[in-house]
Amino acid sequence: MDTHARLVAARAAAEALVGSGRVPGLVVALAADGQPAAVFAIGTDAAGRALICGDLFPVASITKLATALAVLRLVDRGLLGLDDPIDRFVRRATPDPAVTIRRLLCHTAGLPIDLAPADAPYAPGLTWERLGDACTRSGLQYAPGTEVLYSNVGYGLLALAVEARAGARFADALRDLVLAPLAIDGYLGVEPPRVPARIADVRGHHRATELEPFNSRFWRSLALPWAGLVTNAEGVLALVRAFRGHPPGFLSPPLRTAASASQTGDLAGGFIDPLRWNPCPWGLGPEVRGDKEPYWVPPMAGRDSFGHTGASGCIAWAAPAAGVAWTILGARTADNGWLLRRSGAISGAILTGRMA
């Protein structure tokens, strides 16, 4: 399909969404297989600043795609094994041999969604090192291999394994293994050279404080391997396209194929209601669409389509059957439901080349 038709339809759908008032602004990028990215910006950020195509955004859990790619590159180099237990590399981690790199990547290791607040209080003085230590002390919530339970803690342990095998702090290893090779304008744990887009509707008791998630220097300083990446639409698109073989050689074809296919069998699970599914397919980093409902992308994307979302209001997705990948970065958190209920119109326009 002509990329221009996809672009025109996606822009019309994005303009309609911004016009509805559900989100103040969006940056959208899309690319057909083997083609360069096309990017457009609509509306403003939460501060009322007009968005431009290269704007940086906090991309929340889309960070997990980058962390997974760092792990997979070390697997390709023989420095990690998918079925190695995590305590082979992170000695303070749970000694259960069923908690493997593979299960951590696809969220079947049995670890909780988040750290207990008392284990790593979200307050001045918190650092990635303290968060990582807390991850090693987290117990299992379920027996490994019995349920899909989305886990930030698991990705914290994966980051520690990367540090152990790469011999560098995770943020530096991520830069060398993923961001630089993919030419991504991205930042983890360091203040970006330009102010990121401000995200609206951040909730919780740190709202409008110097600790506000997504929008504060403090939050960005934590270098969260499960949520802390700041990048632009083309950077997010590069992450999901890496699982499609762009650029060639970044991941070995067998590992790339495995990473974008479900590793969870018939296991049920997911997040919290209503975002729990039976079954709940998940790859080695990317979430796989399968037959999940309700869902971020329409069924026409294909059961084998894959990607990730972020609570800051963003999505990165690839549809192999349609030969296209795309990302939507919104200037409002996903809490009001716009990402789940309304962004599908943009995805559908990209897939079909026409607005519904």
Image (cartoon, rainbow, N blue to C red):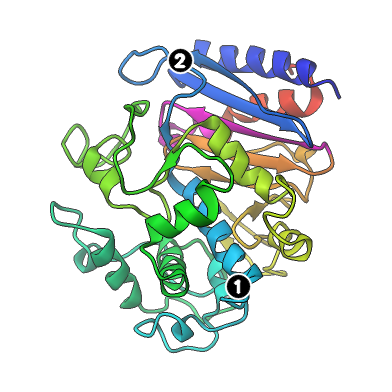
- Secondary structure category for the residue under label 2: loop
User: Residue 271: within the magenta?
Assistant: no
Q: For the point 23% across and 39% down, which residue is it?
A: 217
Measuring from the top left, give residue 59's x and y in whole percent. 45, 40
The label number, if any, that marks residue 72 in the structure image: none
Closer to us: 26 or 275: 26
Q: In 3D space, how far apart are the residues under numbered discs 2 and 1 (Cα atoms)?
A: 41 Å
Comparing marks 2 and 1, which lies closer to the viewer? 1
Left/right placement of residue 309 relative to residue 222 reads: right
Would you identify the image quadrant in which residue 107 lies? bottom right
Which residue type carries mark 2? Answer: Gly
Measuring from the top left, give residue 229's x and y in whole percent. 42, 45
Tally the numbered discs.
2
Measuring from the top left, give residue 46's x and y in whole percent. 34, 21
Q: Is residue 238 above or below residue 121?
A: above
Where are the magenta residues, as a range? 322-339
Would you identify the image quadrant in which residue 257 lies? bottom right
Would you identify the image quadrant in which residue 282 lies? bottom right
Task: Quickly name the residue at label 1.
Answer: 102
* Residue 343 seen in this snapshot: yes
Which residue type carries mark 1? Answer: Arg
Q: For the point 72% across and 59% down, which residue is it?
A: 256
User: Residue 335: within the magenta?
Assistant: yes
Q: Where's the N terminus, which quadrant?
A: top right
Measuring from the top left, give residue 48's x and y in whole percent. 33, 13
Label 1 crowd bin: few (<14), some (14–19), many (20+), radius 10 Å: many
Q: In this view, does 323 lie above or below 159?
A: above
Q: Is residue 203 above or below residue 247?
A: above
The label number, if any, that marks residue 21 in the structure image: 2
